[in-house]
Image: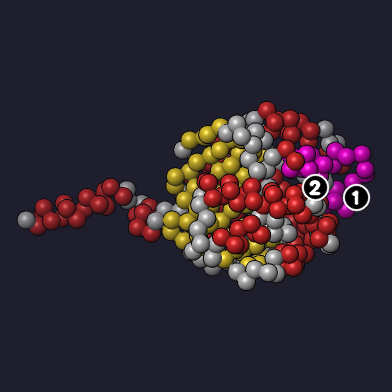
Amino acid sequence: MSIQDKTKQLPLGKRLTRALRSLIGLKNEPLPVEHVKLNRSQYKTIWNSVSVSQDDAKMAVSGYTDEEVYRQMGEGTREMLQSYVGIGPDDVVLEIGAGVGRVGAALAPICKEWIGVDVAENMLGHIRQRLAAFDNVRTIPTSGFDLANVPDASVDVVYSTVVFMHLEEWDRYSYIKEGFRILRPGGRMLVDNVDITSDLGWKFFEEHCAVPPFERPAQISKTSTPQELETYFTRAGYEAIEQIRAGLWIVTYGRKPAAQEQEQQEQGQPAEQLAAAPAEEAQAAG
């Protein structure tokens, strides 16, 4: 595993960074009391409450509503995914925390099927409306803790971008494990979060520290370390794990082993040992 530093900003750049800061309660306006009193794990209640209208939903997930900006950001994320995990015309692609379909609009034209998964039914309704022109788009509701409505080994690429900051650590790991389950052998998964070990990430963290404890909204953003995300991928069983550090962000991606390799791992026998066994048996028989 290696960590690459990219001086070029990822598509989740300065504009989105500013938007995220505007969403954490650092503005002068008083916070809605109901958002402060909610438990952080009440994902469905939280995100349905902020996504009744499409503009409300867009503001809640990104801090802006301009369609041209949405298009540009979606295309930027598409380029990132193509570069790191690859998106092909035969791929079934699933997004965890799809919001209003910002990225789906950029991916649907280049993949076999794009599946938007979100905890908020309101968000899924906005996706169906915004992406109605595509006949290869599907939406699936989630509990906020798993992908129970998605069959095993049914997708080729799973990703989640600008979502892990809103999740508890346990739920981040749960989604990475679930991603492994629903991927076909050789499938790829990518996630990102704010990198607390970077200068920009630390500044982001300190700004959150400035919010008084009893005024923090339930969806206030939380950071990750590269080691945290790498550990989740490793423990879940991924291989070829890579990380990209780019300013505010740490991006982590990996691959589900091919069918034979996975079977060997599950049996607890090293692949090279299994490969040598038939030769040894033939030698003994001779």
Q: Is residue 47 above or below residue 112?
A: above
Q: Amino acid at mark 1?
A: Val
Horizontal relation, residue 92 to residue 286: left or right: right
Residue beneath label 1, please?
Answer: 33
* Residue at (27, 52) in percent of width and height: 274
Instruction: For mark 2, give the secondary structure.
Output: loop
- Residue 8, quarter of picture: top right
Structure colour scheme:
secondary structure
Task: Mark yes or no: residue 124 visible.
Answer: no
* Residue at (69, 33) in percent of width and height: 201
The numbered mark, 2 or 1, whose residue comes first in the sequence reads 1
- 200 and 218: which one is in front? 200
Q: Residue 110's x, y, as percent? A: 56, 60
Instruction: For mark 1, give the secondary structure.
Output: helix
Extreme residue toward the bottom, this view = 135
Tag in front: 2 or 1: 2
Numbered circles on residues, count = 2
Q: Residue 68's x, y, as percent? A: 75, 52
- Residue 55, quarter of picture: bottom right
- 185 and 273: which one is in front? 185
* Residue at (64, 30) in percent of width and height: 198
Q: Is residue 263 above or below residue 6?
A: below
Extreme residue toward the top, this view = 199
Horizontal relation, residue 94 to residue 184: left or right: right
Give the crowd class for mark 2: few <14, some 14-19, many >=20 residues within 10 Å: many
Q: Residue 5's x, y, as percent? A: 56, 32
Q: Is residue 80 above or below residue 125?
A: above
Q: Does the magenta-highlighted stretch encompass residue 92?
A: no
Residue beneath label 2, please?
Answer: 63
Q: Which residues are magenta?
A: 16-41
Q: Residue 182's x, y, as percent? A: 52, 61
